[in-house]
Image (cartoon, rainbow, N blue to C red):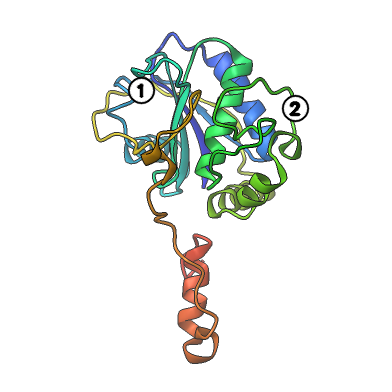
Amino acid sequence: MKLCFFRSASNIPTEALGEVAERVGRVFGIDYFVFTGPILCSVEEVSIEDLLSISDRFLEKGEPIVAIVYTREKVEDYAIYGLSSEASRGAWVWWNDRIEQIVTVTIHELGHICEADHCDNEYCIMYPVYREHKATRMDRLFCSKCLIVIQNSWVYNRLTQASRDRIRKGRSRSGLVHTAAVQISSGPFNAPHRIGSLPSPEQSNPPPSTFPEWPSWPLTKAEKEEFIRKVLEYFGYEEDE
């Protein structure tokens, strides 16, 4: 799994986008990939499958992604700075040229993708109303409760494990991936999480996770091979890897 950044407009500067990606990657301790070619469609039309197909053209094919899409569009509620979907492993973030705010909102949305809900601790970056944050470490940005949730999440562990594997094998290429503009049209992200205003009641209940569950321990005695298969599936590996 890899963390990928996309822009939906050519007037979002790639150099500034690269700076945001570098700072976010540093906080989470993972490598990242910034696709330079703009996605020529509304953020309401793009799907994670569309973005995965772009990644497959230029990076290792078939590797799952977590996608952050930056847009100059705004939703009807102008207090909203970003939307994310844990189930779809994607988010969009409003690009307003305020780098500090964009970094904060991106980290917040990644927190949602890594299973953290909104937090009532106003000093935690998962607080639902935007606050400025200057810290650059996870343990300073997230409260202890949210940090535990994130570090135990399936997505966070897949991202960090895959990043370490790429670095160990010399395949890590953090930075810009030069691509042409891409015209796509598909279904939207399912986006229950917002930052900037308090969530509505229906947003408080995100869709059920589609990630594989940890296998039942009794399988170790009853069906050892099935248990091993499910463990490999949990960590995203095929049986023959």
Residue 189 visible, this angle: yes
| Secondary structure type for disc 2 | loop
Which residue does the image show at 67% across and 34% down from the upper left? 124
The spot of residue 211 in percent (x, y) is: 44, 57
**In this orientation, which residue lies closer to the viewer: 67 or 180?**
67
Q: Which residue is mark 1?
A: 39
Badge 1 amino acid: Ile
Can residue 52 be seen by looking at this rendering? Answer: no
Q: Amino acid at mark 2?
A: Ala
**Is the C-beta separation of discs 1 and 2 under 8 Å?**
no
- Upstream in sequence: badge 1 or badge 2: 1
State the mark number for residue 135: 2
**198 and 208: which is toward the camera:** 198
Instruction: Indicate the position of residue 61 as horizontal and vertical percent values.
Output: 42, 46
Between disc 1 and disc 2, the foreground one is 2
Mark 1: secondary structure:
loop
